[in-house]
Each structure stands twice: as structure tokens, then as C-alpha cells.
């Protein structure tokens, strides 16, 4: 389980890792050689039969890596041309050294340089490019994106900003594969960068792992490495109450399905007991559809508070199907006053649009807020737009709310108030189906009930949710998600 590092480093941290290596006796020229070799290896794996290759080399160290790739492929007998941006004698340091070691054909960068290429190595710019592509680099990238050659990008597709996960004006190389070094950067996991990268290969090039301890990244690819150790495992001594008693608050009689989806998710993911707290008028319909899950009648916020006074209920989810307005706000306060671990989703969030001050002022510490982008905008107006990236936006939101915030989407981002952030990459597009968010709320609830801390519970639930959808495949509807959990758990217990 511990093979692929899960830390994500920013561009500034990448330069810090470089410096750390240099200070610990690893020459940067060796790093560049190893980087180039890793890229050449990937090229050979993707295209075992030699064919015309064009390496687009930029003015910095990314271009330096490109010269290494060109040399290594040429040494294997491949026909290689370097298309260089700028003058060769303008190159500096390690890049200049590797340009000096290149004895093959070099032409000026231009769209015409792509003619006849079967594979293009993109070594124009790395993750640090902090402006848009201009001039001949821009023209060449536009031509490349309409070319039939497969494209392998070094570090990031050129034009994509490593921290932001997008290009300044939307234009960057569309790669078929990307090789990056030491650790992934945000651009490899955030949308739309993740699509521009294609599959990302992470290569270790000699930067000592201790650099990570010095850098202390707070950003992680969501996966077992992040939360596996904290994941609840079967304990032969435990009884059902040891696995927690989760409660999902149901909506009125005409809107009960969402709560049942969440409840089923919580039960499948291992909560010992699950109850649907149901308004009395909805008890019949809930009871008709539930078996292992219990139904607990209540009326209004006071009734909910009374119900939750039973200390055995240790985690509560509210929001799916409950309706927007004052009655829901009152129930949310009842949940928060009960001091239980809580998931606030859907209508429980929208009910506080324009009234977040009171919500953020209450005891949210044990809660997880699970907005999609629309709900996020209602709770944190303008924050997504004004933040440099989704990571910054969700981190700020978590600090503001004082609890874990999970922003849903193809790159679901979970942030804790202490600054930790996870980004999920395993969710398929067919998760965008009615009710799948309700099941996610249930998964989080079930893990909270099993005493997992909110940031890790939310991250683990998102990963399980993505895997459940992938495993089921196309045609997925929300009801299918909980039923995938047993097979996932069987494998997970063996791996963690
Ligand atoms: N530890 C690792 O991961 C290792 C990483 N390595 C590699 O190094 C790469 C990073 O190299 P890097 O720092 O030289 O950056 P890179 O993009 O090649 O070019 C910089 C050039 O871009 C320009 N320029 C950019 N922004 C600008 C701005 N705002 N304002 C003005 N100009 C700006 C400017 O040139 P100009 O356009 O002005 O001519 C500048 O010279 C990394 O991606 C990886 O491939 C490996 O070799 C080994 C270990
Ligand atoms: N294109 C996509 N790729 C991956 N996951 C997606 C995509 N679109 C939506 N999802 C996921 O589907 C779920 C939808 O949740 P939500 O918007 O709350 O819907 P609902 O309220 O119908 O349950 C979220 O987990 C979200 O991350
Ligand atoms: K590049």
C-alpha cells in the first residue's frame, strides 16, 4: 500500500526539494539526467518501435531535461530532432551543459518543426511558468494540439501552471502522458489540469525522501496512504454499539428517499446501527422501505433534540431531502447542540445562504460540510472565484467555518481547519447521478460513527465512493453505490 507517495508539493516546495538535494550532496545535473532518463523510459514503453521524435525544448531546466531525452533516444537509434525556443547560447547551468552534450539536429521552434513527428516530447516549460504562452511557443502549442503525434510532457504540459491546475488563458499542451518528478504538483490532480496531463508517471530522480520531512506538505492525493492507518478494522472483541449508531434525518413524507440512500450508505460502510429519524408524518413510508435500518419518529427541532439526548447515537447526518428554511435551520442547531459528529449536506447548507455568520459561530468542530459548487457559493459567496485555486478556496472555507469542508466534483477537495487538504482523483463522470451525493453523506456518516476523525473520514468516504462507482461502471444509479462496498472492504482490509 505504501508504494506511491501521496504528498503533493507546490512549485515553491519543488524548488525547496531541489535545494535540499543540492545541500545534501546530490548534484542538480544528476537530477536532470535521471529526470530525462525517466522520460525516455516512458517514451520507450509507449512507443516500442522507433519513429521520428521531435523534442520541444524551452529556455529553462525543463528544456534541459528535453536535451537529455533527445540524447538518450538518439543513442537507441531513434531519429530525433530538437526544436529549440530561443538561442542555444542563452541556455544556462545544467540546461546549457545538456545542450552541449546534444550532437543531433537542432531547429528553431516553430509549428513547421512538428512535420512528420510520430511522437513529441514537450519540454518547453515546467510547473513554474507563471504567465501565458506567447509568440512562437503559443503558435507551436496550438499546432501541436491539432497534430496526430502522441505527446509526452515533461513535468507538466507546457502552459499549465503547477499550482493553479490551469493555464492562465486556457491554452496549454494537451498531453497523452506526463512524467513528473519526486512528488506530484497540484496541476496533476486538479481539473482541468488533470485532463491536460493524461496519465501521470511519478519518477524518483535522487531527491532524498527526507526532503519531504523538511517541506512538510499539507496537501495529499486522496487514497489509502492518507487514511489507511486510521480506517476502522474488524475487531473480534467489538459488538454493534462499538461500531457506532448513526442517525440520518429524513425529510417530509414526499421527500424521504434521500435520507434512506444515506442511511444505506452508512450501514454498508460499517456503522453498527443506523436509524432514520423520521417526521411522524413520514414514518409510514420510511418504515415500508426499511428493514435493517430502524425508524425513530420525531417532530420538529425540539423532538430531534430530545431524540438525540440518547447518548448512543454518536453521529448524525442532516440535509438530503429535508427542505430549505427556518425549520431546517432549527434542526441543524439541534444537531450541533447535541455535540455529535455531524454531516451537514444539501438543504442543511442551502438553508444558511446569507446567514452563515450564525452557523459558523456555532459548535461546528465535529462536523463535515459537503457542498457541491452551487452550495459552496451560497455558503462562501465569491470565494471560489477570488481564490487562486480550488485548494485555496476550500482551505479558506474550512478555516472560516472551523470544520472540515468537502467540495464535490470530479476533483473533490477536502480541507481541515488545520490546513490539511486531500484531492480525490478516482471518481468517474457517471457519479453525476441523482442521489449519489446522498450516499456520500452516508458513507462519511458511517465512518464518523466508527470514530474516524472528520478529515480522514471524509477523505476515505470520497475515495470509497469513487471506487464504488468505478467498480460498478456505466449505468450506475445511486442505489448501486452502497452495494459495491462489501467487495471494496474485503480488499481494503487486506491492504491496510
Ligand atoms: N526537483 C525537480 O522537480 C527537478 C526539475 N527539473 C526540471 O526543471 C524544471 C524547472 O525548471 P525552471 O525553473 O528552469 O523552469 P522552466 O519552466 O524550465 O523555465 C523557466 C523559464 O521560463 C520563463 N519564465 C517562466 N515564468 C516566467 C515569468 N513569470 N516571467 C518571465 N519568465 C518566465 C523564463 O524564460 P524566458 O521565457 O524569459 O526566456 C525562464 O527562464 C522542471 O519543470 C523540470 O522539468 C529537473 O531538471 C531536475 C529536478
Ligand atoms: N464529472 C464528475 N466526475 C466525477 N464525480 C462527479 C462528477 N460530477 C459529479 N460527481 C460526484 O457526484 C456526486 C454528486 O453529488 P450531489 O451534487 O450532491 O448530487 P445529489 O444531490 O443528487 O446526490 C458528488 O460526489 C460529486 O463529486
Ligand atoms: K513541459
Image (tube, rainbow, N blue to C red):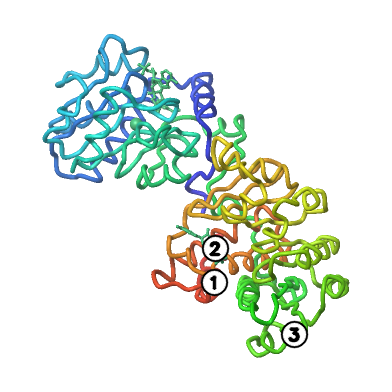
Task: Categorize mark 2 by other alpha carbons within 10 Å: few (<14), some (14-19), many (20+).
Answer: many
Q: Is residue 98 above or below residue 403?
A: above
Q: CA distance from mark 2 to mark 3?
A: 34 Å
Q: Are the two marked residues, 2 and 3, in contact with CB atoms closer than 8 angstroms?
A: no
* Quadrant of the image occupied by residue 277: bottom right
**Mark 1 and mark 2 in contact (Cβ < 8 Å)?**
yes
Looking at the figure, which quarter contains the C terminus?
A: bottom right
Residue 118 lies, in percent from the top left, at: 16, 40
Where is mark 3, residue-wise? Answer: 281
Residue in the foreground of this view, choosing between 371 and 473 = 371
Write down the residue under mark 1: 485
Judge whether 410 appears above or below 122 on screen.
Answer: below
Mark 3 CB within 8 Å of ligand 2 = no
Q: Secondary structure at mark 2?
A: helix
Residue name at image x 55 percent, y 70 percent: 435
Relative placement, left or right, of 245 versus 480 is right
Q: Which residue, given by chain and number where applicable, does mark 2 sit on?
A: 464
Please tell me in which quarter of the rendered image ligand 1 is found. Answer: top left
In the image, the residue with mark 1 has its CB under 8 Å from the nearest atom of ligand 2: no
Using a 10 Å C-alpha cutoff, classify the residue at mark 1 as few (fewer than 14 neighbours), some (14 to 19) or many (20 or more): many
Amino acid at each position: 500500500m505504501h508504494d506511491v507517495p501521496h504528498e503533493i508539493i507546490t512549485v515553491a516546495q519543488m524548488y525547496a526539494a531541489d535545494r535540499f538535494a543540492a545541500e545534501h550532496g546530490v548534484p542538480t545535473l544528476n537530477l536532470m539526467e535521471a529526470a530525462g532518463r525517466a522520460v525516455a523510459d516512458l517514451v520507450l514503453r509507449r512507443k516500442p518501435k522507433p519513429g521520428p521524435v521531435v523534442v520541444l525544448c524551452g529556455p529553462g531546466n525543463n528544456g534541459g531535461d528535453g536535451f537529455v531525452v533527445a540524447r538518450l533516444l538518439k543513442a537507441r537509434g531513434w531519429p530525433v530532432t530538437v526544436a529549440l525556443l530561443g538561442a542555444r547560447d542563452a541556455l544556462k547551468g545544467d540546461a546549457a551543459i545538456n545542450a552541449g552534450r546534444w550532437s543531433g539536429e537542432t531547429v528553431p521552434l516553430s509549428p513547421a518543426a512538428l512535420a512528420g513527428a510520430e511522437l513529441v516530447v514537450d519540454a518547453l516549460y515546467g510547473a513554474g511558468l507563471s504567465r501565458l504562452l506567447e509568440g512562437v511557443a503559443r503558435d507551436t502549442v496550438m499546432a501541436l494540439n491539432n497534430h496526430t503525434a502522441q505527446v509526452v510532457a515533461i513535468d507538466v504540459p507546457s502552459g499549465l501552471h503547477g499550482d493553479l491546475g490551469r493555464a492562465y488563458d486556457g491554452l496549454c499542451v494537451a498531453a497523452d502522458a506526463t512524467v513528473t518528478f519526486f512528488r506530484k504538483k497540484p496541476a496533476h490532480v486538479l481539473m482541468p489540469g488533470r485532463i491536460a496531463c493524461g496519465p501521470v508517471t511519478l519518477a524518483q530522480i535522487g531527491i532524498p525522501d527526507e526532503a519531504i520531512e523538511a517541506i512538510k506538505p499539507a496537501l495529499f492525493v486522496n487514497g489509502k496512504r492518507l487514511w489507511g492507518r486510521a480506517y476502522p478494522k474488524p475487531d473480534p472483541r467489538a459488538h454493534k454499539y462499538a461500531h457506532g449508531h448513526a442517525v440520518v434525518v429524513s425529510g417530509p413524507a414526499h421527500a424521504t428517499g434521500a435520507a434512506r440512500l444515506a442511511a444505506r450508505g452508512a450501514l454498508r460502510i460499517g456503522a453498527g446501527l443506523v436509524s432514520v429519524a423520521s417526521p411522524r408524518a413520514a414514518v409510514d413510508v420510511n418504515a415500508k422501505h426499511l428493514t435493517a435500518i430502524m425508524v425513530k419518529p420525531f417532530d420538529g427541532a425540539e423532538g430531534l433534540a430530545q431524540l438525540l439526548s440518547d447518548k448512543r447515537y454518536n453521529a448524525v447526518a442532516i440535509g438530503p431531502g429535508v427542505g430549505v428554511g427556518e425549520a431546517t435551520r432549527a434542526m441543524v442547531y439541534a444537531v450541533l447542540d447535541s455535540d455529535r459528529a455531524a454531516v451537514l449536506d444539501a438543504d442543511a447548507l442551502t438553508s444558511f445562504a446569507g446567514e452563515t455568520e450564525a452557523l459558523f459561530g456555532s459548535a461546528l468542530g465535529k462536523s463535515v460540510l459537503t457542498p457541491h459548487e452551487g452550495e459552496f457559493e451560497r455558503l462562501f459567496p465569491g470565494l471560489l472565484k477570488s481564490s487562486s485555486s480550488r485548494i485555496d478556496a476550500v482551505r479558506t472555507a474550512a478555516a472560516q467555518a472551523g470544520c472540515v469542508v468537502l467540495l464535490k466534483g470530479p476533483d473533490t477537495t477536502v480541507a481541515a481547519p488545520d490546513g490539511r487538504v486531500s484531492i480525490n482523483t478516482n471518481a468517474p463522470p457517471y457519479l453525476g447521478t441523482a442521489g449519489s451525493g446522498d450516499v456520500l453523506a452516508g458513507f462519511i456518516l458511517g465512518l464518523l460513527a466508527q470514530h474516524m476523525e472528520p478529515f480522514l473520514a471524509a477523505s476515505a468516504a470520497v475515495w470509497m465512493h469513487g471506487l464504488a462507482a468505478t467498480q460498478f461502471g456505466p449505468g450506475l444509479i445511486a442505489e448501486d453505490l452502497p452495494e459495491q462496498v462489501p467487495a471494496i472492504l474485503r480488499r481494503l482490509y487486506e491492504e491496510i
